[in-house]
Every structure is written in C-alpha cells, then in structure tokens.
Image: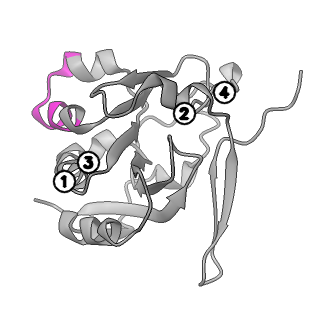
Amino acid sequence: MPPINLHSFLLRSRANGPGERAVVWVQGCNRRCAGCFNPETQPFATKELVTVEELENRIAVIKGISGVTFSGGEPFEQASQLAELAKKIHGLGLTVVCFTGYTLEQLREANRKDWNAILQEVDLLIDGTFIESERCAEPYRGSANQKLHFLSGRIRPEEVAEAHQTAELTLSLDGSLTATGFPEMEKI
C-alpha cells in the first residue's frame, strides 16, 4: 500500500469533531473551493510520506482522545490508505470523522472500491463543497450546504447538538503555530 501524503498532524483538537481528537490533514485536493481555509493543502506535492502503521503508532500513544479526524486536502484522494488507517483507529477504540468536498451521494454513486472502503469506516462524514457565500455558524460546517452524516452509530447526533463553531490556535514545542477550526463569523 502506498504511504499517506501527510500535510500535517495535530495531537489534540476540539474544533474538528466531537470530543477531543487527533487531526490528520492530507496533502492534495482537486476541489479548489474558493475561500478554502486550508489552501496550502491543495497542491499535489509531496509533504511527509508516512505508512499507515507509522500514523497508527503516533495515534496509539495519545492518551484521552475520543477519535481522529481526517481533513485536508481531500481525504478521498487517499481513500485506500485512510480506510486502512480508520480500521486500525477503530481497533484502538476510537471514532473517525472525515471532512470531504464531495457529497455522500457523489461518493456512493461513483461506486469506487476505495471510496466504498473508507465510507465503511467513517463514523461521521461532513460533506459538501465549501461555498464562501453560504458561510454559516453550524457546528463543524463552513457553509450551509454542508451536511453531517452519522454513518455508523458510534457518533450520535446528540453529541454534536450542543457544539459550537470554534477556532483553535496550537503552539507546538518547536515554535510552529497551527490554526484550525472555524473562525467566528462577523455578526450581520
């Protein structure tokens, strides 16, 4: 199996799904949404190549998280690798959240083996192209067209019902700063 082209990895976040989660940002996205919060993840350039096992080991040592979130870039560009990682994450007793610019209908209609494999492992799918003119304040969504799909029952709607959009800044020991989540919208 080819390695995962990892853009970045965050040990802990509360802005990228319910509970405290590790976040895996993959590199490469052909969607090119105007106003993308992560435009640096779009080019199909090699960043950090890691095996599924290496990433599983990074995740396994993090204490107190409830799951892992896949974001990007476009996770479905590396669906086979992430499907395998998601199986291993479930084996650790954790949940999987996945952001995608595709709709669930598009993913299912494509009937691709790799896309079907990751859909079998995702607990909460947040789908849809980001549309800048439809920005919203709904939890875990950047625009009003995006939807939450509870695919497995491991994450329930009531777990996100009380959530609020939030943005996080994380300063690493090496001095790097990670901005993630959803910045507060200006009041209209």
Tag 2 near tag 4, CB within 8 Å: yes
The residue stretch that appears in magenta: 109-118
Residue at mark 1? 91
Q: Looking at the image, is mark 3 or mark 1 earlier in the sequence?
A: 3
Instruction: Work out which quarter of the rendered image holds the C terminus and state it.
Output: top right
Residue type, numbered disc 2:
Cys
Judged from the image, the secondary structure of the residue bearing numbered disc 2 is loop
Residue at mark 4? 132
Tag 2 near tag 1, CB within 8 Å: no
| Residue at point 36%, 70% (across, down) | 48
Q: Looking at the image, is mark 2 or mark 1 earlier in the sequence?
A: 2
Instruction: Work out which quarter of the rendered image holds the N terminus and state it.
Output: bottom left
Q: Nearer the viewer, residue 6 or 124?
A: 124
Tag 3 near tag 1, CB within 8 Å: no
Judged from the image, the secondary structure of the residue bearing numbered disc 3 is helix
Gap between marks 2 and 4, in whole Å?
8 Å
